[in-house]
Image (cartoon, rainbow, N blue to C red):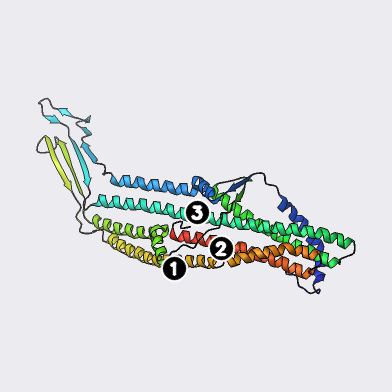
């Protein structure tokens, strides 16, 4: 905001930049008057419904959950058996010679064996448990993504509400200055007021036009972010409908109960717990891998053993002497310690974040008292009479400008406080992982 001094010493700059200011004044008119043919008015609940139906990031994460469930199904399956065969290919100048000799003795040889791997030490069950934990991790990652995107969605929604309210304030003040300047222009033509007074009010309006243009840019940025979350393209303009704020009470909760709620619902904290669980399961699985698996299966050997028709049972297992999976077991132990340390850090961070978010919410509530609301209402009534008082020469030009600028500052701070209150609620909801408001 351009600050206008109460002395007359700075009037030279007004006269020097007046042509440029009027050019800026004219240049901002088309931006403000740009027509929008497709406006979509949405409440917060309607916005969230569209978001849940169309957001592609959530859809992609949902596919990851289904992929994790498929891994559980895979872990439940047994290993496929192995078929081994061996037979003579060429002998006695003949290919694949099989059958019997003239004397009835068999000729040719072939070997067939089927083997099945049997996992020991509960490896299969441990793999199933790890895969199921992987599903839980994917589900909580989906919840984490949804919680953060919902926080972003609501923040953009409330920010857009505040920016549009600021734009409405600027439009109201601009209309008031238009009416005032129309009367002052006639008075100036009649020689009743000095040119410097007219220029100063015109400069005040030019400054307001610049603020309107800057605010419109912020509105466009918020529109773009919100439309991206809702998968809306084209020239559609979103018009958020603010929620009714009456009757909202401070929840009768303490920080300890809020932390308990957060530990149950905060997706980031739950993911930390699941990472510890997964690494502990992995440690148990690595220990189980040190126990050798057994491969068993029948075999049939035709015409290549002490009997023409040999049927045997094969059994094999590795001897855990040189390997023992010792390196992987040691690494798994350190990974458990790492995730346990991360969880301890996440616990401290969660408690501090919840306490901080709750205090921020309490701070904003302290400024939303009935006395403050009465002040804003009284100040608005005062502002409505200021322009008329100036027209009737009951106050000076400098007093009018002071009142005009002060009202704009008070109203923008009031709107910012309303936004801060909404954002504080959403931050607390995000930390808790639950909508307590």
69 sits left or right of 121 in the view: right
Residue found 28% across the figure and 44% down from its top: 77
Depth check: give the residue in front, 435 or 356.
435
For the residue carrying disc 1, how many other residues have a C-alpha within 10 Å: few (<14), some (14-19), or many (20+)?
A: some
Mark 3 vs 2: CB contact within 8 A: no
Task: Give the residue drawn at x 27%, y 55%.
Answer: 285
Which residue was labeled with disc 1? 352
Q: Which of marks 2 and 1 is in front?
A: 2
In percent of width and height, residue 187 lies at: 86, 62
Q: Report which residue position mark 2 lands on.
A: 420
Q: Can residue 424 be seen in this view?
A: yes
- Between disc 3 and disc 2, whose residue precedes? 3
Residues at badges 2 and 1 in contact (C-beta under 8 Å)? no
Local SS, label 2: helix
Image position, residue 191 (x, y; %): 90, 64
Q: Nearer the viewer, residue 292 or 113?
A: 292
Tell me residue 152's x, y (percent): 52, 56
Give the alpha-carbon distance from disc 3 to disc 1, as whole Å: 22 Å
Instruction: Please say if 60 is above or below 188.
Output: above
- State the CA–CA distance, disc 3 to disc 2: 17 Å
The number of discs equals 3
Element class at badge 3: helix
For label 1, the SS is helix
Q: Mark 3 points at which residue?
A: 150
Can residue 2 be seen at all in this image of the molecule?
Answer: no
Instruction: Give the mark nearer the N terminus: 2 vs 1.
Output: 1
Mark 3 crowdedness (10 Å alpha carbons): few <14, some 14-19, many ≥20: some
With respect to residue 158, does 357 lie above or below? Answer: below
The image quadrant that residue 381 belongs to is bottom right
Q: In this view, does 422 lie to the left or right of 19?
A: left
From the viewer's perspective, tell me whether residue 323 is left or right of residue 191.
Answer: left
């Amino acid at each position: 905001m351009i600050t206008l001094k109460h002395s007359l010493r700075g009037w030279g700059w007004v006269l020097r930049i007046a042509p440029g200011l009027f050019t800026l004044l004219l240049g901002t008119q088309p931006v403000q008057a740009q027509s929008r043919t497709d406006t979509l008015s949405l409440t917060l609940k309607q916005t969230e419904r569209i978001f849940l139906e169309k957001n592609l990031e959530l859809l992609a994460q949902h596919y990851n959950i289904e992929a994790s469930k498929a891994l559980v199904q895979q872990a439940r399956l047994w290993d496929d058996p192995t078929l081994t065969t061996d037979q003579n290919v060429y002998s006695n100048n003949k290919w694949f010679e099989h059958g019997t000799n003239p004397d009835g003795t068999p000729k040719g040889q072939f070997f067939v064996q089927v083997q099945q791997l049997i996992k020991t030490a509960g490896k299969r069950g441990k793999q199933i448990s790890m895969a199921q934990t992987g599903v839980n991790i994917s589900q909580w990652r989906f919840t984490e993504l949804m919680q953060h995107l919902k926080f972003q969605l609501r923040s953009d929604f409330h920010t857009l509400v505040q920016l549009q309210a600021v734009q409405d304030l600027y439009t109201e003040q601009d209309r008031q200055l238009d009416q005032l300047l129309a009367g002052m222009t006639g008075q100036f033509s009649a020689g009743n007021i000095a040119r410097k007074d007219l220029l100063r009010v015109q400069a005040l309006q030019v400054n307001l036009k610049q603020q309107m243009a800057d605010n419109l840019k912020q509105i466009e940025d918020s529109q773009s972010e919100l439309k991206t979350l809702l998968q809306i393209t084209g020239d559609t303009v979103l018009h958020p409908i603010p929620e009714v704020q009456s009757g909202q009470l401070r929840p009768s909760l303490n920080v300890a109960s809020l932390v308990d709620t957060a530990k149950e619902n905060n997706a980031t904290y739950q993911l930390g717990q699941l990472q510890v669980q997964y690494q502990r399961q992995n440690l148990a699985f690595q220990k189980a891998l040190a126990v050798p698996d057994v491969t068993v299966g029948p075999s049939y050997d035709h015409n290549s053993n002490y009997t023409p028709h040999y049927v045997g049972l094969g059994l094999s297992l590795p001897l855990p002497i040189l390997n023992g999976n010792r390196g992987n077991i040691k690494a798994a132990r350190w990974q458990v310690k790492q995730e346990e340390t991360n969880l301890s850090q996440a616990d401290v961070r969660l408690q501090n974040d919840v306490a901080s978010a709750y205090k921020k919410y309490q701070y904003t509530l302290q400024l939303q008292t009935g006395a403050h609301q009465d002040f804003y209402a009284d100040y608005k009534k005062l502002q409505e009479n200021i322009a008329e008082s100036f027209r009737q020469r009951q106050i000076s030009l400098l007093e009018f400008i002071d009142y005009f600028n002060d009202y704009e500052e008070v109203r923008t701070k009031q709107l910012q406080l309303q936004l801060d209150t909404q954002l504080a609620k959403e931050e607390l909801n995000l930390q808790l992982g639950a909508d307590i408001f």
